[in-house]
Amino acid sequence: MDGNQQVLPLTFAVVDEETYPSWRWFLQQLSRHVIRGRRGMCLISDRHGKLIKAVREGPDFVSPHGVHRYCLRHVCSNFNSTIKNVVLKDLCWQAGSEYQLRKFNRIMDEKRSRMSKRLHN
């Protein structure tokens, strides 16, 4: 994150399409030119299946070297595409943005309650 608490993109690539080989190539270039053996790097991405496969097969974003996390905006968007409820999408965002476990659990309890009511109506 930068000084304004915003995610700082380190690199990008223009490719023909999002395929397993293009993601492997991208991650290899990222490793070679940016990571360069450093540990503790975090890759934040959407849940594209080919990317997930490429990440799992490379060493840089698998513990203990680094971590791979999903972008909260994409998680909430996918959640909304499936559930189609703006209130629940907002609760998803609130839960994902929360730093305190107590508050996170409260939001998740509310989300579970609303989803349960939705399923039973």
Image (cartoon, rainbow, N blue to C red):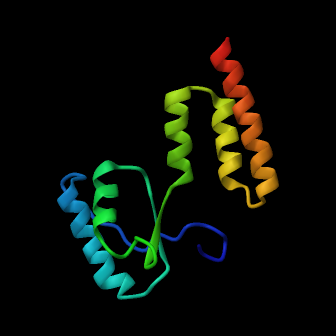
Give the side of residue 93 with respect to residue 8, left or right.
right
Work out whether 79 lies above or below 74.
above
Which residue sits at x=76%, y=38%? 109
Q: Which of 84 and 38 is in front in this view?
A: 38
User: Whole-percent x and y of residue 15?
Assistant: 21, 59
> For the view shown, which residue lies furthest in the front direction?
64
Work out whether 77 lies above or below 58.
above
Give the side of residue 6 with respect to residue 56, left or right.
right
The picture quadrant where one finds residue 58 is: bottom left
Give the side of residue 91 with respect to residue 7, left or right.
right
- Badge count: 0
Q: Which of 44 and 11 is in front in this view?
A: 44
The picture quadrant where one finds residue 37 is: bottom left
The picture quadrant where one finds residue 88 is: top right
Q: Nearer the viewer, residue 19 or 113?
A: 113
User: Whole-percent x and y of residue 33?
Assistant: 31, 84
> For the view shown, which residue lies furthest in the top direction?
121
Give the side of residue 9 with respect to residue 91, left or right.
left
Where's the N terminus, which quadrant?
bottom right
Work out whether 115 lies above or below 37.
above
Work out whether 55 lies above or below 33.
above
User: Whole-percent x and y of residue 102?
Assistant: 81, 54
Which residue sits at x=21%, y=61%? 22
User: Whole-percent x and y of residue 30?
Assistant: 32, 76
Where's the C terminus, which quadrant?
top right
Which residue sits at x=70%, y=48%? 95
